[in-house]
Image (cartoon, rainbow, N blue to C red):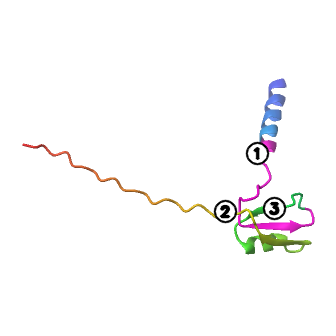
Amino acid sequence: MRSAFFATLVLGAAAALSNAPAQAGERAFCMKGQGIGSAIGDCSYDTYEQCQATASGRYNYCDANPFFQGYGVPQERRHRRHRSHRNAY
């Protein structure tokens, strides 16, 4: 019984710690207004439309994230040249 309680407690603590709030600079748009705990806002939206859809029906609005650095451009994959291992006879 104790081990089941301890396991539940550990899993609950891990779940609580993994749900950290979004940090500034993470996404392009932030929702601001009533019920938002951060001064910067909830910056978890990739598009303005996503933010507007979430803010709809509340006393909230959307704004561009001033700390957004942009999404990293994926580097091109370099193709390695395979040398043929031919005998030099």
Considering only vertical position in the picture, is 38 above or below 87? below
Q: Where residue 3 sits in the image (x, y, percent)?
A: 80, 25
Q: Is residue 25 magenta?
A: yes
Q: Which residue is mark 1?
A: 18
Q: Residues within 10 Å of mark 2 (few under 14, many from 20)?
A: few
Residue 60 as seen in the image, left or right of residue 21: right
Q: Which residue is mark 2?
A: 69
Q: Identify the magenta region.
A: 15-35
Q: Nearer the viewer, residue 56 or 79?
A: 79
Q: Quadrant of residue 33?
A: bottom right
Q: Residues within 10 Å of mark 1 (few under 14, many from 20)?
A: few
Q: Is residue 67 magenta?
A: no
| Residue at (58, 60) in percent of width and height | 72
| Residue at (36, 56) in percent of width and height | 79
Q: Nearer the viewer, residue 27 or 10?
A: 27
| Residue at (74, 73) in percent of width and height | 48
Q: CA distance from mark 1 to mark 2?
A: 24 Å
Dot 3 and dot 1 residues touching (CB under 8 Å) = no
Name the residue type under label 1. Ser
Name the residue type under label 3. Asp
Q: Which residue is mark 3?
A: 42
Q: Where residue 29 sits in the image (x, y, percent)?
A: 75, 68
| Residue at (82, 67) in percent of width and height | 31
Evaluate whether residue 1 shows in this view: no
Badge nearest the viewer, 2 or 3: 2
Q: What element does badge 2 sit on? A: loop
**Rendered-image quadrant of the N terminus:** top right
Residue 6 as seen in the image, left or right of residue 47: right
Q: Quadrant of residue 41?
A: bottom right
Q: CA distance from mark 3 to mark 1?
A: 17 Å
